[in-house]
Amino acid sequence: MKNLLLGMSISANAVLGYLLLKENGSFEDIESQANNFADKAKGKAQQVKGAVSGDFSDKAEGNFNEAKGEVKDQMDDIFGE
């Protein structure tokens, strides 16, 4: 589990670095993209925790959080923030 969380942390930092270096976009766009990514990563971690422990509520909450991040991404794409 520690390796999974470490890998997700490294991935999140890499994505955040990419977003910060990306020329087009404002700070609000970067913040929104980072928050959406965090929701999706949190959801994936909860899904894995639920699958490993057999806890259906963790898995369901993970599905919800991942979907929330996806919906926020799509809303940002549609409305262009």
Image (cartoon, helix red, strand yellow):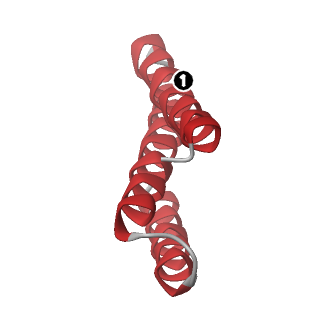
Residue 61 picture quarter? top left
Q: Residue at x 56, y 38 (%)?
A: 79
- Which residue is at the front of the view, 71 or 62? 71
Three-letter residue code for mark 1? Asn
Q: Is residue 50 above or below residue 22?
A: above
Q: How many numbered tags mark residues here? A: 1
Residue 4 screen position, x and y as percent = 51, 59
Which residue in the structure is indicated by mark 1?
A: 63
Q: Residue at x 56, y 46 (%)?
A: 80
- Which residue is at the front of the view, 4 or 37? 37
Q: Is residue 30 above or below residue 53?
A: below
Residue 78 screen position, x and y as percent = 63, 36
Residue 73 picture quarter? top right
Q: Residue at x 45, y 75 (%)?
A: 13
- Which residue is at the front of the view, 67 or 10? 67
Q: Residue at x 56, y 29 (%)?
A: 71
Badge 1 density bin: few <14, some 14–19, many ≥20, Cα 10 Å: some
- Which secondary structure, mark 1? helix
